[in-house]
Image (cartoon, rainbow, N blue to C red):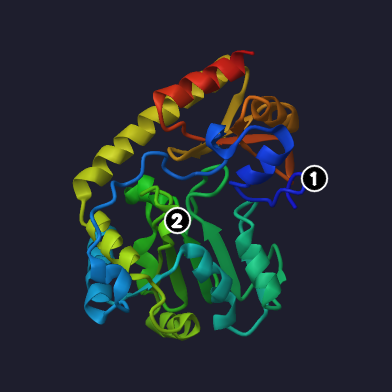
Amino acid sequence: MGNGEGIVDHGGGVDAAVARWGGVRADWIDLSTGINPQPYPLPDLPGPAFADLPDAGAEAALVQAARQFWAVPEEAAVLAAPGASALIARLPALRPAGRVRIAGPTYNEHGRAFRAAGWQLVDGAAEAAVVVHPNNPDGRFHDLPQAAFAIIDESFCDIAPGRSLMGHATRPGVVVLKSFGKFWGLAGLRLGFAIGDPDLLAGLSRLLGPWPVSGPALFVGTKALRDGAWADATRARLTADAARLDRLMARAGAGLVGGTPLFRLYDVGVAQDWQNRLAARQIWTRIFPYSDRWLRLGLPGTEAHWARLEKALAA
């Protein structure tokens, strides 16, 4: 548990916040996640996307779109899955348990998954290594981790495609993770990708079983990954909105620690006080068990939400 109030150490958890501070879910602004608040517009879905089992042709189209969007090297394999979290939970089982080094503080599910599979988390030499690139919550970029089994979590890297480590996906033992929910803002669609060592991904595919990705996710994911114009415009908007949030928080007395255009991390002195103050105005933010000073905010999605945040910060 992340904050001592019975709320799991993740973004989200708005229902628990509602139970403590009141109101109804629709009244709340959820700034606790790093999900694009202006999602990719959903296309009309054909009936067979829901009624039929996902077919090989739809999966192949999604994989090809992913290869093109992320400039995946030909030698690397691409595996679509029901969200990056499903991949994170299964990756440790691909190698015998040993020592793993995870660059932190970072997204806690990597450590949870490796511990559950019997691995020992260490700071030094290790058989496996994990980096979140850019890091959650501070936005740091990393070099390729040096280990026989190297996981590069690029769930937030679509905001900076030029910084991707995808070129290393051809190396034995390397897996690059991609999340569809963050940049495209469709976390509920549950779509993610593992890219890299074909032998590792073959084992991962067996663990996921048949038809891991739903028909609607195959259809929407393919269309979105082919829409480069939307991606370019979205990067520009997110960058501008992140700068706007920095200015707003600076006026309120917060110091920028880091982040990405999808989320910003601030030093606010006593983070729990800031979270409580904003929650009393039905705005939910993120604090961390390893720092009592850090507050993370995602981006408001509408002008009305920006206005509410500015008013709450001035109160």
Residue 265 versus residue 123: which sits nearer the camera? 265
The label number, if any, that marks residue 4 in the structure image: 1
- List the single residue furthest toward the right: 4
Q: Position of residue 154 (x, y in %)?
A: 44, 57
Task: Describe residue 73's horizontal placement relative to residue 113 as left or right.
Answer: left
Q: Residue at x 45, y 40 (%)?
A: 262
Q: Quadrant of residue 268?
A: top right
Q: Please give the residue where the numbered disc 2 appears in the rendered image.
A: 188
The label number, if any, that marks residue 289 in the structure image: none
Residue 207 versus residue 188: which sits nearer the camera? 188
Vertical side of 217 occupied by 43: above or below: above
Q: Position of residue 269 (x, y in %)?
A: 72, 26
Task: Describe residue 37's horizontal placement relative to residue 23 as left or right.
Answer: left
Q: Quadrant of residue 252?
A: top right
Q: Nearer the viewer, mark 1 or mark 2?
A: 2
Q: Quadrant of the C terminus?
A: top right
